[in-house]
Each structure stands twice: as structure tokens, then as C-alpha cells.
Amino acid sequence: MLQAIRSIFLFVVVIFMLTGCASMTFGDLFAGYAQQMQSVTIPAANGRFDQALQQVTEREISDTNYVLTLLEKGRLTHLAGDHNASKTYFNQASIYIVQQKLKAKLQLSQGVQNIGAMLSNDNAITYAVPDYEQSMLHSYQALNYLYLGNHEAALVEIRKANLVQRAALENNVDEINGAIASLLGDAELGWQSVSAKYPEMAEVIGEVKNGFQNAYTFYLSAVLYEASGELNDAYIDYKKALAIYPNNRSLQNDVLTMANKLGMTADLAQFEQRFGQYTQVDIENEGQIVVLYDEGLVKGRDEILLRLPVDTSQDEMRFYSLALPVYQESHQLSYCAQLSLNNKTLDFSQIVAVEALAAQTLKSQLPSLITRQVIRLITKEKMRKKLSKEAGDVGNILANLYNFASERADTRSWLTLPQSSNIVRSHLTPGKHRLSFTVGGMNKQIDVEIKASRITLVNITSMGNYIDYKTVNL
């Protein structure tokens, strides 16, 4: 018995040593990130951001989830109105992401981390911030700078967000490549079994074509470019956003308006064929109001177990249970939101469904996730045989218990992002106005000051029984 316990103890110690420069907690090993974050997301979903901040786990820079902590704190402090603190957290996250990309290119420590993951689970691998989360990071950082009165820095962040999406578009390749094939070794997976059993996530993904083209970022970028007089750049990004959401009436109007302003007669004619005749509504010295409405919190990844056949080099067919992340169809309530002004009611149009981007990103990662899972199960099985040989039935039982407990899907993602974001736009005469925002039976009066020939940006946040807003003249 003592020998068996010593063997298991050494086995677990080796796992944590093999994570190399990165580290993970026992909580990360045996419990999913989404599960651990419930103490944060529950108060946050009801507008208790200070309480949520206190529940965010403190992590060292060597921790595999360090950057997630920065992202969660950045968004929570942004929501709480502490934009200086939010700016600091997002800046640290941005620097960290750049450093991790350089490490990945040099392939430093990544192989050692993968070995550790083979003996535990994917939480032993340093979290790689996906493209859609990076673009949201820079978008919220741009808003931070706007609220702090630094419009130039906001435009810099917007350009960074656009660079993320441009690079993602250029580098978009299949996840199954030579590196993954070399990892597979002597294991072959029945891919038909995977496709038959793994949920398609079609209801969650909807019509989203990829996980990195973010219309929210393009739209915010276009509004800021327009406000700064860079109309050509604004026109380009309005069109990019429209390509993602072609049925968004607000975007259609923006593209028609910008094509008319720039004298793009050929473009205007084409867009009028698609969206109807353009009617100019600009009045001299009249101001505009652009409203971004962030709703709820994005749903986290769930975990499913798939029992799949694996062929080994000994021509043995074995069935293993694979723990994989998945986005199940969301049952979160989504209420119709409206904005009333001057006896006129305006409906919002969705500009991003964050969960759809997250699900599409996960779908693209699935081949490499499953490959690592298969290798992991084979590796753990070899360790189990070794412990069984050295410590008998007790070692076999303890090894099986460890393998079962540590078989956890990687449910990590940025969980304080909104469930969705929506837009609406209108023209107003200069001066002070009171708008009325209504959602789910709740109402919020919003005071804004419209300036002549200027855009006033209003950012509304609604979650649970909480509604708040911020305004800035661009």
C-alpha cells in the first residue's frame, strides 16, 4: 500500500514538473475553468462587479490561466467604471499575448507543456487567447481611452484590433497540420465516430462563417474613423461589418450614407439595388447618436464525454471516454430592447453574438483537441500498466481513479464578455436630450448632450436587473 501511494504521489508530482515554465493549480487539474468561475459570473451577471472582482483567482505570471485573470479583471473594472484599472489590466494582457506569440514562434517550452498535458489534461497548456477575444480586448481598451478623454490612443487600439483580424484572415489554415500529425504517433482515431457523436453546435454558431471576423470591432472602428474625419477608412470597415451582418438595417444605412458622402456613385447604385433607395437625412449642424448595447454575459463551455474507438500499434481496438469542451444550445433569456427618443421608437440590431464566435473557434480547434485527447488516453493507459506492475491491484485502482478524476475538458474562455452586442443610430438636434431605454420590462432614462455635426457614443450595459450606460462625444 505504501509503495502504491508513493508511486501515485510521484506520478502527480511529475505532471506538475512537466508543465515546465508554466504552472497549474490542483483546482485546474480536477475542475473546469467555467465551473471555477461561477463565483465570479453569478454576481457579475447581476451587476455586482466589485463582489465579482474579489472572487477572481489571483494567479502568478507562470500560471497557465494568468492571461485569463487579466482579461476577466479588465472587463469587470471596465463595467465598474474604473477605466484606469481596466486599462492597466488590458495593457498587461496585450503585452503577455505578444510575448506568448514570440515564444510560440521560437517553440520554447511548448513541447514540455504538451508532455505535461499528456499526463493530465489541456489545462496544463498555457491559455492561448483566440482572435475574437483579442479583438474584443482592443475594442474595450479603445472604449477605456475614449472615456478617459484620449481619442488618439483609442484609434491606436482600434488599429490593433483590425490587425488581429487581418492576421487571422491571412493565417487561417486547417488545425490538422504536420505538427499535429507528428504528435499522433501510433494512434489512429475513427473520425467518423467523432463526427457522429460530437454535437454540431449549429444552433449556437448560426450563420457565423469563422471565429475571428468580428463585426462589433469593425463597427466601432468605423464609427471612430468617421468621427475623426477618416471617411475612407470608416467606409471600408462599415462594409466589412456589413459583409458579416448583411441583414443589419443600421449597417445598410451606414454604408449607403458613407458611399453617398464619398461620391462612390457605382457603389451607391449597387447597394441601392440590394437595400433600397437611399434617402439623405443629414441636416446641416445636426448631430448623431450611436448606441452600443451589451447584453448579459457569454455562456461558458460545457463538458461532454464521448466513448470512441482507438486503434493502437498492437492492432487492439479499445474504447475510451474522451472529455471534450462544447457549446450547448443557450437557454439564456434575450429580451427585445428598444430606444425611444422624440416620440419615436428605435429597434436594436445585433452586431455580434460572442457565443457564436466562441463556438466557431472551438469547432476549428476540434481536430487538434481530439488528437491530444487520444494521445493522452494512450499515455495514461501506459502509466496505469506501469503502476499496476509496480504496485499491484492498489496501484491499478489508484491510477484508474486519477485518470478518471483528471479527465477534464478545457472549458477556458473569457467569461465576462457580453452574450451579444447590438446597435442603433439616429440623428438629433444639438442640445440636451433624454432617451428612454427599455428591455425586459425595465426602463432606464439616459441623458445625453448632442453637439452639432458630431457623433455622441452611448454604451449601454444590461444584465439581470442591472442597467447602466456611459456617454462620450466623439
Image (spheres, grey):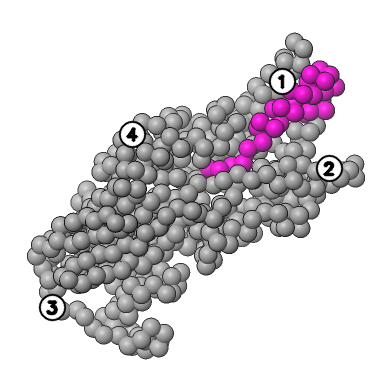
Q: Give the residue at x 38% y 61%.
A: 216
Q: Nearer the viewer, mark 1 or mark 2?
A: 2
Q: Above or below — where is 23 with respect to 451?
A: above
As measured in the structure, the alpha-carbon distance from the residue carrying label 1 to the one carrying label 3 is 77 Å
414 displayed left or right of 143? right
Residue at 40 percent of width and 88 percent of height: 273
- Asked if residue 131 lies left or right of residue 138, the reply is right
Residue 105, given in percent of the width and then of the height, sits at 57, 46
The residue positioned 53% from the left and 64% from the top of the image is 206
For label 2, the residue is 318
Residue type, label 3: Glu
Q: Which residue is mark 4?
A: 51
Evaluate if marks 1 and 3 touch, with contact meaning CB atoms under 8 Å apart.
Answer: no
- Name the residue tied to disc 1: 8
Residue 27: give x, y in percent of width and height.
55, 29
For disc 1, the neighbor class at 10 Å (few under 14, some 14 to 19, many from 20) is some
Q: Is 438 placed left or right of 36 in the picture?
A: left
Q: Quadrant of the C terminus?
A: bottom left
Q: Amino acid at mark 2?
A: Arg
Circle nearer the N terminus (1, 3)? 1
- Mark 1 and mark 2: Cα distance apart in space: 24 Å
Helix, strand or loop under label 4: helix
Q: Residue furthest top?
A: 2
| Residue under label 3 | 284
From which residue to which does the magenta span run?
383-412
Q: Is residue 349 visible?
A: yes
Name the residue rendered at 13%, 78% in the picture: 284
